Image (cartoon, rainbow, N blue to C red):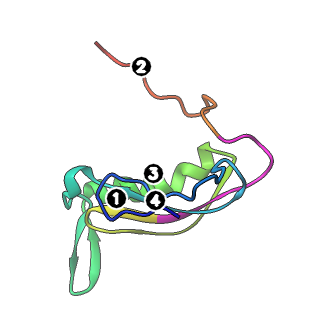
Amino acid sequence: MTRRNTIGVLSRLRRWDYTQPGAYFVTICTHSGECLLGRVVNGIMQLSTFGEIARDEWSSSSQIRREIRLDTFAVMPNHLHGIVWIVGDDVVGATGRAPLPPRVP
């Protein structure tokens, strides 16, 4: 496995097909590591509005993407950790089930 501790560099297993069913550990970071998602007070994470949005969007992901199931997750001040299960025999990739909004020039 190739791994670097540099922000923005992915750690991936060589020759692994990440479209295969299985459990995947996911980390989603804020831009420049800004603590936008909340703060820890007395050892308890207090979500900001952005943190609540991140939590809610994580929780709704399996409702709009039938090929995944969600496991445990945690929102931290500047990132989110979670486990995503890819299930079934469907090919994973861009399908158009959750399209991005059109770009406005």
C-alpha span from label 2 to label 4: 31 Å
| Residue 14 placement (x, y as % from top left) | 58, 55
Camera-near label (4 vs 3) is 4
Find out whether residue 87 is within the magenta segment. yes
Q: Earlier in the sequence, mark 1 or mark 4?
A: 4
User: Which of disc 1 and disc 3 is earlier in sequence?
Assistant: 1
Question: Which numbered tag is attached to residue 11?
Answer: 4
Residue 105, horizontal then vertical, whole percent: 28, 12
Cα separation between marks 1 and 4? 27 Å
- Pointer 3 residue: 57
Magenta range = 82-92
- Measuring 55% from the left and 50% from the top, which residue is drawn there? 61
86 left or right of 28? right
Q: Earlier in the sequence, mark 3 or mark 2?
A: 3
Residue nearest the observer in this picture, 85 or 1: 1
Where does label 1 land, which residue?
A: 52
| x and y, in percent, of residue 42 in the image | 21, 87
State the residue at coordinates (36%, 19%). Answer: 103
Q: How far is mark 4 from mark 3, CA to CA?
A: 24 Å
Asked whether the beta carbons under mark 2 and mark 4 sit within 8 Å of each other, the answer is no
On the image, the x and y values in percent for residue 82 come to 49, 65
Frontmost of labels 3 and 2 is 2
Tag 3–tag 1 contact (CB < 8 Å): no
- How many angstroms separate mark 1 from mark 2 (CA)? 25 Å
